[in-house]
Image: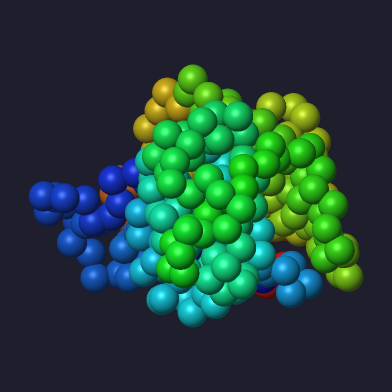
């Protein structure tokens, strides 16, 4: 299994508009953060999780040429507003609608933002069409399974995802945009080979885990490798990563991880 971090930044991105702080002006490329999303390749199946405002540019940068399954973790702007660029993948799957797995909240947001995509096929080549499907607790595919669990994120729940590749048995966990990780989600993640957690910033936040909170959850899960994502300009990658516990690192745009 391969995981490609298309973006690892928060809703404002890094550098931020009109900010001259040391991180926003840093020469370290790991401090250049587009909005968060990942691309998972599991036994040849290409799964895209979320579509940020920079989705098209992220796909070009990382040479993403295939997309079989799309999962929307929730309907916030930094995760949904790149979905119009999924139109190219509708072309690449033969001009058919792309299945979008999400929550009830996610479906409502897609319907309100992209009403023109609700069709069995695009109205013309180069247009998007989506088939909205409620993400099941366990999505069983020939290449493996994707388990979902709900994570509290302010006034909504987001989808936490656990990927298990059938051929290798490797397990990968993606828990972004959450204030805490409930006991059931911790239990699902135990035994995973790699984990990604929301770790917004050093200070507490009402709807995201802080870096310390994320590190505490990582210790509970006990995976050999954990990456923190959805980072703000308050985190300078190099110096801040040096202070993290063993086995925990910051993700960065373009990072590729073999699981």
Question: What colour scheme does the image use?
Answer: rainbow
Residue occupying the point 61% across, 72% down: 94
Residue occupying the point 55% across, 35% down: 107
187 or 223: nearer the viewer: 187
Q: Does residue 65 appear in the picture of this structure?
A: yes
151 or 108: nearer the viewer: 108
252 or 84: nearer the viewer: 84
Residue occupying the point 39% across, 66% down: 56
33 above or below 4? above
Question: Residue 15: x and y, percent?
Answer: 23, 56
Question: Residue 43: x and y, percent?
Answer: 78, 72
Question: Residue 42: x and y, percent?
Answer: 74, 67
Residue occupying the point 81% across, 43% down: 138
In the rendered structure, the answer to whether residue 128 lies left or right of residue 68 reads left
Q: Residue furthest top?
A: 155
User: In the picture, which quadrant includes the N terminus?
Assistant: bottom right
In the rendered structure, the answer to whether residue 189 lies left or right of residue 214 reads right
231 above or below 69? above
Q: Does residue 226 appear in the picture of this structure?
A: no
Count of numbered marks: 0
Question: Residue 259: x and y, percent?
Answer: 72, 67
Residue 187 falls in which quadrant of the image? top right
């Amino acid at each position: 299994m391969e995981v490609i971090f298309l973006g690892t930044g928060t809703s404002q991105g890094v550098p931020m508009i009109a900010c001259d702080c040391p991180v926003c002006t840093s020469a370290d490329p790991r401090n250049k953060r587009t909005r968060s999303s990942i691309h998972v390749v599991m036994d040849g199946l290409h799964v895209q999780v979320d579509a940020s405002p920079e989705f098209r540019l992220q796909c070009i940068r990382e040479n993403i040429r295939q997309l079989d399954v799309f999962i929307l973790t929730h309907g916030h702007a930094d995760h949904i507003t790149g979905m119009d660029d999924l139109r190219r993948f509708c072309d690449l799957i033969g001009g058919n609608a792309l299945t979008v797995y999400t929550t009830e909240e996610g479906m409502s947001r897609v319907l309100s933002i992209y009403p023109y995509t609700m069709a069995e096929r695009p109205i013309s080549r180069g247009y998007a069409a989506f088939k909205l499907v409620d993400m099941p607790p366990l999505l069983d595919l020939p290449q493996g399974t994707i388990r979902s669990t709900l994570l509290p994120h302010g006034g909504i729940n987001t989808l936490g995802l656990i990927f298990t590749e059938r051929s290798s048995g490797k397990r990968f966990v993606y828990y972004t945009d959450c204030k805490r990780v409930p006991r059931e989600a911790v239990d699902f993640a135990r035994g995973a080979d790699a984990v990604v957690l929301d770790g917004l910033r050093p200070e507490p936040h009402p709807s995201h885990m802080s870096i310390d909170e994320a590190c505490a959850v990582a210790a509970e899960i006990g995976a050999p490798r954990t990456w923190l994502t959805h980072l703000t300009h308050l985190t300078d990658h190099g110096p801040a990563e040096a202070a993290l516990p063993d086995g925990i690192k910051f993700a960065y745009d373009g990072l590729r991880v073999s699981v």
